[in-house]
Amino acid sequence: MIDPNEFYGTPNSPSEHSKRKMWESIESGIIPPVHKRLFALERRSFLYGIAAAIILGFTSIGIYVTVKNAIDYAQPSEVRIDRAYQSAIHEFEKVSLDIHSNATPLPSDAEVRASRQDQLRELETAIAQLRTDTRPGDLSPLKRTKLRELYAMKLSLLQTMLEQGDLEL
């Protein structure tokens, strides 16, 4: 019979280095390397996510612009004209309303300037009052005409103030 103690002799048993290499080879055959595969999947999914985010961003911007343009074009021309007057006056005031200049005005210039400023404030008050009295959907011709007249008077006054030197660009 075979003695279990003599089954593997010292010349036949593998060394510690050989055992470690053998087990590493067995483990690599049984269990695939997880960290390499996960990194490849993460990189690919990351790139897909970035591409999807960019496409989603462009799509949402396109939808926003399309809806905004559809709403703007769906409004009546009177409302668009009203907005054009408002934006023109707002931009003109933003650029030119520096009423307090560094020059010392003569007394008569100060009176004229103060009078024009009072007229400007009265026009702004009248426009604001007419806008608060008018409902958002109200497009009556009388109110539209009055609002246009007030806008025209305000633009005319601002132009006069600019030409007279009351406003500086």
Image (cartoon, rainbow, N blue to C red):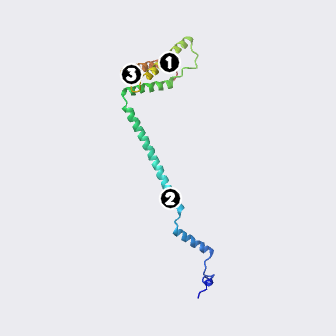
Q: Nearer the viewer, mark 2 or mark 3?
A: 3
| Nearest the eye: 96 or 147 | 147
Residue 17 rendering spot, x and y as whole percentages = 62, 73
- Residue placed under numbered mark 2 in the picture: 40
Q: Residues within 10 Å of mark 1 (few under 14, many from 20)?
A: few
The residue under the point 51% across, 61% down is 37
| Nearest the eye: 5 or 71 | 5
Lower sequence index among marks 2 and 3: 2
Task: Single out the residue that lies furthest toward the top.
Answer: 108
| Nearest the eye: 160 or 3 | 3
The residue under the point 62% across, 76% down is 15
- Residue placed under numbered mark 3 in the picture: 144
Circle 3: residue type = Arg
The residue under the point 42% across, 39% down is 64
Q: CA distance from mark 3 to mark 1?
A: 20 Å
Vertically, is 56 above or below 123?
A: below
Residue 140 rendering spot, x and y as whole percentages = 36, 22
Task: Single out the residue that lies furthest toward the bottom.
Answer: 1
Task: Single out the residue that lies furthest toward the front.
Answer: 1
Give the number of callouts: 3
Circle 1: residue type = Arg
Lower sequence index among marks 2 and 1: 2
Residue 117 rendering spot, x and y as whole percentages = 51, 17
Circle 2: residue type = Ala
Q: What number is the disc on residue 121? A: 1
